[in-house]
Image (tube, helix red, strand yellow):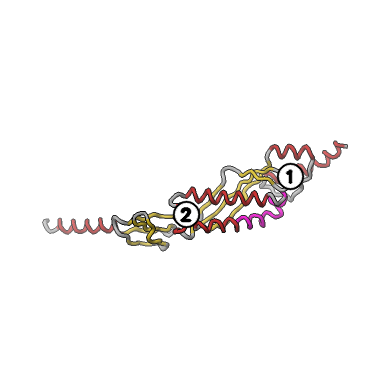
Amino acid sequence: MNRILPVLSAVMLVLFLASLCLFTVDQRQYAVIFQFSEAKRVIKDPGIHFKLPFVQDVRYFDKRIQTIDENMPARIQTIEKMNVNVNSYIKYQIFDVEKYYKAVGMDERKAVDRLRNTVNNMLRDEFGKHTVQDVISGKRDKVMEYVGKVANIDAERIGIRVIDVRIKQVDFEPSTLNSRCMSGCNLSVKPWPINYVQKVVLMLKKLKPMLINSAK
């Protein structure tokens, strides 16, 4: 019995030291080893890794593709001075975790806000150069491809790669609908059943002859 206790104590001590020195990295994560709040080493490969006890600690960053899904639509004006509300989403991924940490630290919200502002500003610029018909049907893919490329250039400065930028929905503001209905403006576009704007546009197109006849 007296011999077993020292052995158990030694085993417990080894396990304790191992828990302080060893850590695991999941395949879905990056790990950064910090020493006195300074990043010393970035670990990208999954498995068991070593750190110095007491003086070093580990922080984890997600390497999976993340999605920014807009809750509040951005108010944007087209070249025809028509106000529309645009819902979009952004898919991004951290590719340079050291650059990412230097830019935003552990505050993911800073990166999200920066990406969202960049994309919304680009959407305003591009919508301002195109008609409603362009941005919801004819040139929509080209517009979004350009927005994604420009957003990616800015995102790479903070260690992020933009994977995709898409428009979920475009809606006219009520004031815009009222003014267009009163003027009887022709806004014919190709059918797109999943979009509310498209349905309204088709309705306005059908109403145009009636508005012209009533004006006579």
Residue 19, image x, y percentages: 29, 56
In the image, residue 154 lies at what x, y percent? 55, 56
Image quadrant occupied by the N terminus:
bottom left
| Quadrant of the rendered image containing residue 35 | bottom left
Residue 102: give x, y in percent of width and height.
45, 55
Give x and y (percent) for residue 14.
Answer: 23, 59
Dot 2: element: helix
User: Which residue is the site of mark 2?
Assistant: 103
Span shown in magenta: 131-148
Of 125 and 13, nearer the camera is 125
Residue bearing the label numbered 1:
201
Instruction: Give the left or right position of residue 213, taking residue 70 as reference.
Output: right
Residue farthest to the left, as pictured: 2
Q: Is residue 189 left or right of residue 148?
A: right
> The residue tagged with tag 1: helix, strand or loop?
helix
In this rendering, position of residue 79 left or right of residue 61: right
